[in-house]
Amino acid sequence: MKKFISAILVLMLVFTSLFVISTSAAEADDIVHSLLPAANDVNGKVTTNNCDITYNDDGSVTFTVTGAGASVNVVYAEGATVWAGDAFNAKEGAYFVVDYGSADGATLGQSTQAHYTRKDKDAAGTVADLWLTSMEGSDYAQYQKAKGDGYVIWDIGTYISSSDSKVFEDGMHRFTSLELYVDGSVGSSVTVYRFYVGTADAVEGIGTVRPEAKVPDVSEDENSAPATEVEIPEGAINLGKVPLNTGITTGSTTIVTDPSIIHNYNVKWTACALLRPTETEGEYEVVATKWLDGDDSFLFEEAEEGDVVLSVHGDDDADGSKANREALAALPAGSIVTAVGYDFAKITAADDAVVFFVPATVEDEVSETPDESSEVSSDESAPEADDKSEDASVPATDGSETPSDDEGGNTGLIIGIVAGVVAVAVIVVVVIVVSKKKK
């Protein structure tokens, strides 16, 4: 009898092992194309800027900031040359999966964007842009299948198929390139575990693996020392702690530590001020201001080494942001912006860092202050996956089927239920046999 029970237990262990293997392998089967860079350009031609890449044994990739504007560009297809990038079928269901974490506060930049082929762009010989801020933000929340700290599953298939103008007749689309940005201080890093387009709307274990947090050493504590206490003048525009080198979203602010890379941070609907350090620590002179009315093609030609750019977005839905943007745009050259608690060379900011300036008087306002006719809606201001003028919330009704929320990720669950039923049946048989022998 003991041998019989032992044999049953062995069979159950084997079956359970097969179940675990089958569910863990299921994700690999669901991946159509990983967009992460790989060693020796085997997954696309890789170009880095102020960023080091480490290819980890578990398939994840770690990006480390070495300077301002840390970024990685990967080209999957270029002309007749295709390094990688299998086409995905939007009509049959396609999901963009992102999963990343950091031990020291670095993060994927919200301006990260993947470019892909689409019918309405194809006619003009261009491609579409899928922004990380669009996937993680609220503007396209109806396409989020899962969302949490550092991860998102975004229903790109339904988004494309929601309009006949977007989807190719055969449903086949391809990612062509990636612009990946890393926000963080010099030396900080972020590890990306998943960054792919696949066929499943659920991923086991997403968001659960994270690097172990680093314990700050003494030098790091010194770098993060509290900002010198400073009195903010009455009537000043207080922007609080402005983040460094981060993508602009609705009503947000950023300081770009290198004026030559301001285009990386979606500043096209902001007021920008070129700031130059003065002899007084924490005070910066305004060299020039620019209101970007949807056009970020300009450069601050006056920029010198050590200059930074303050960028302020304004929106009716974000309290005070519109007034802040207009006040910055109206600052005449020679005005002072105070930024206390920052080390722009190391790209660090103290917890109590603060940025403020005294707005110009009515008599001093410059003629470039934007008027109401140039205002844009919040839909136009935020980084977009694409044109928001279309009703992207209504799925297409062209006869193709869109997977329901219950499909495309439940195979493992079904197998688990079957395994449980089989196990219970085996135990019942064992109990009956033992009972009969006792009689």
Image: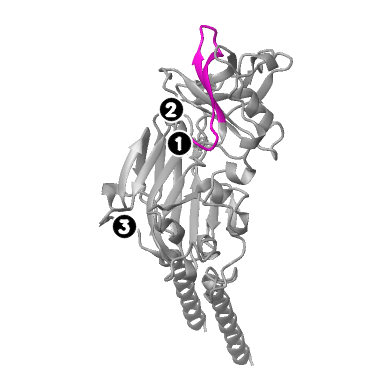
* Residue 81 painted magenta: no
Q: Is residue 103 visible?
A: no
Calculate the distance from the C-alpha at mark 2 to the C-alpha at mark 1: 12 Å
Amino acid type at circle 3 is: Ala
Mark 2 surroundings within 10 Å by alpha-carbon count, few (fewer than 14), some (14 through 19), many (20 or more)? few
Q: Which mark is residue 254?
A: none
* Magenta-drawn segment: 271-295
Image position of 8 with respect to 409: above or below: below
Residue at disc 3, secondary structure: loop
Mark 1 closeness class: few <14, some 14–19, many ≥20 residues within 10 Å: many
The Cα atoms of the two marked residues, 3 and 1, are separated by 25 Å
Is 288 included in the stretch rendered in magenta? yes
Residue 425, image x, y percentages: 58, 84
Q: Where does the image place residue 121, in percent across and percent down from the top left?
A: 43, 56
The dot on residue 299 is 2
Sequence-wise, the earlier of marks 3 and 2 is 3
Percent x, y for residue 198? 45, 63
Q: Amino acid at mark 1?
A: Asn
